[in-house]
Image: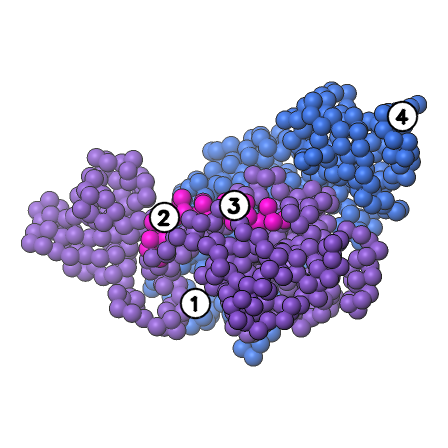
Chain colours: A blue, B purple
Amino acid sequence: MARIYIEDLQHHIGEEVQISGWIYNKRSSGKIRFLVVRDGTGILQCVMVKGMISEEKFSSFDTLTQESSLSVTGKIKKDDRAPGGYEMEISNIEIIQIAKDYPITPKEHGVDFLMDIRHLWLRSSRQHAILRVRHQIIKAIREFFDNRGFVLMDAPIFTPAACEGTSTLFETDYFDLGKAYLTQSGQLYAEAGAMAHGKVYVFGPTFRAEKSKTRRHLTEFWMVEPEVAFADLNDNMALAEEFLEHIVTSVLKHRAAELKVLERNVKFLENVKKPLPKISYSEAVEILHKKGINFEWGNDFGGTDETVISEQFDRPVIVHRYPTKVKAFYMKRDPQNAELALAMDVLAPEGYGEIIGGSQREDDYDVLLSRIKEHNLPQSAFE
Amino acid sequence: MARIYIEDLQHHIGEEVQISGWIYNKRSSGKIRFLVVRDGTGILQCVMVKGMISEEKFSSFDTLTQESSLSVTGKIKKDDRAPGGYEMEISNIEIIQIAKDYPITPKEHGVDFLMDIRHLWLRSSRQHAILRVRHQIIKAIREFFDNRGFVLMDAPIFTPAACEGTSTLFETDYFDLGKAYLTQSGQLYAEAGAMAHGKVYVFGPTFRAEKSKTRRHLTEFWMVEPEVAFADLNDNMALAEEFLEHIVTSVLKHRAAELKVLERNVKFLENVKKPLPKISYSEAVEILHKKGINFEWGNDFGGTDETVISEQFDRPVIVHRYPTKVKAFYMKRDPQNAELALAMDVLAPEGYGEIIGGSQREDDYDVLLSRIKEHNLPQSAFE
């Protein structure tokens, strides 16, 4: 008897199959016992009728607790009333393990409690849906770049002496060779890779030793960093909007059931289509001023500023041409206005704020060198 | 004029296009100047004829050095004699940067020298091919699991106090919360995930603070860890052989040109088809004895032993049922022989040795608990 997964049941209607999983729910009604089994890919209602199975197997029903593991065998029929749409008439049942005092019950639990049993919390329907949505996002990200001929580079996690100071770096002893630091960005590696392959992306864990609570990132988080040789600011903005549209479309298409579990209002998601609105930093400042916010031209936007700006739009908005002093030294300056960097950020609606930052890179060696000197950065490290 | 990539030239025959890239080679012949340009996706021969372009542009040819960057515009025609199969008749040329003293020349360089200029070495044809093969392998790995309904989990890089000692762990200060350690394996996270999703995989960087030079792994390397609930040893072996076949088939299909650059003998690769040969540990020991190697039953195989065993086969070989004492405590014991663990390793041909290790997990709580006590492991950490 081949074991199959609940997600594949539609190919096995009328067949006798085996499912292995965990007790999600059970109830009894006269001579009938209902077991709802989950196997990680779905849930299946399984029915035992007294007299159709050995007395011993039938009465084992009483011992089954939430999250006990078992294998059930039986014939599959379609049943629209059953959760999941199928039902199994159990012909055999094998109990693997009886769970004792499973700590997560339908009642509300606090996050501290749930974090202490994180390995079990993963089984709850909301956590289950989140991980599947996350997987789809990552899959869509890689598809996007792979289908456009980008070459994947994995920049090293261990990096040598930092170019821009060590205050927000995690460090570790690296044998007798001194310290190694955990990467904050693969950008410099990706830039070298783009010169070799034309277009590359880095997608791996990055680290920031910042203890502050921020909506931007955790101390450890995965970051996507494409790098395209010869790309200008317009190319960057086009890449960003195509990228977001591809990811959101993929999640809406393949993870609709999970978004429903999460009670996600998909209105904003359905709007994520190119072209995205594009405004200059100066236009964004005007929006703040019109809203009565006291904001000085030349400063960087804070979280509240980003929220106010993004609330003016029904989808992510691209803000471009920031003052050079709030952006990194390696960004090319606007030939029309040397006070501006050819940089862009994408601000997401619903208060999420900056989700992408990018720029056209300075490609003039002498200019780059003078910027490194102006910023008192260690030239030898950058070489 | 839209900029295109050399890999897309076949769709632009007869059209005027722009290519941006770097000088790979050049030569002149009478009134004709040949530039070979690489853009990371391929190489293209570009031709300038005296009189067909301004004198200034024509003579700029003389200033171009290896790896200088430029944009060339012109009409594309098919030409089987040209490297890459296409040729551009240059109508315009814009030099972006003249490279000075590019350090990598066609002569042989030592690895120490090349490692010091790793960012430039990436551009060399062999390095270029390696990164593209690596990308294809990673893509095939993710496709394999994604197409089989596995859910991706990314286990954290930072882990708390280690279960099995800290001697080979990298550590870092984690604010005022003590030490965090860099992960050696996502297995425990994946096991919890498999109970939630049925089948999951972890695929990210892992770390071993081992300074010894070994063919097994670097101090930092990417590891793939699938975990399947209810899977037995036979399921593991079937997954391993399908996995290897999928990866190798994908690379042979999509990276034939790169394998040629690498002068890879693909004979062993073409053999990587299921079923792979499967032998028990005891049969593997017999092979060693027949070859006159002094090996005591019960020990773990060393690198040379693995090479001798794998040399007997024309494709990877699966060795199963190892002595429990050379395998981890959480592996289930063979019900036929309590001295054996239901473990398997895949040994690759050509001296590469172990490339996969796996096992059926012990699923009896009481047995697992007694093993943790036997091995003097900290029960609380595992809880």
* Magenta highlight: main SS: helix
- Residue type indicated by callout 2: Ala
Query: Residue A50, labelled with which disc?
Result: 4
Labels 3 and 4 share a subunit: no
- On whether residue B90 falls in the magenta region, the answer is no
Query: Residue B256, labelled with which disc?
Result: 2
Q: Nearer the viewer, mark 3 or mark 2?
A: 3
Q: Residue furthest left?
A: B30
Question: Which residue corresponds to mark 1?
Answer: A382
Q: Residue at x 82, y 41 (%)?
A: A95
Q: Residue at x 62, y 60 (%)?
A: B281
Horizontal and vertical percent position of residue B224 = 58, 53
What chain does mark 1 sit on?
A: A
State whether residue B283 appears in this view: yes
Query: Residue B274, labelled with which disc?
Result: 3
- Residue type indicated by callout 4: Lys
* Mark 2 touches mark 4? (CB < 8 Å): no
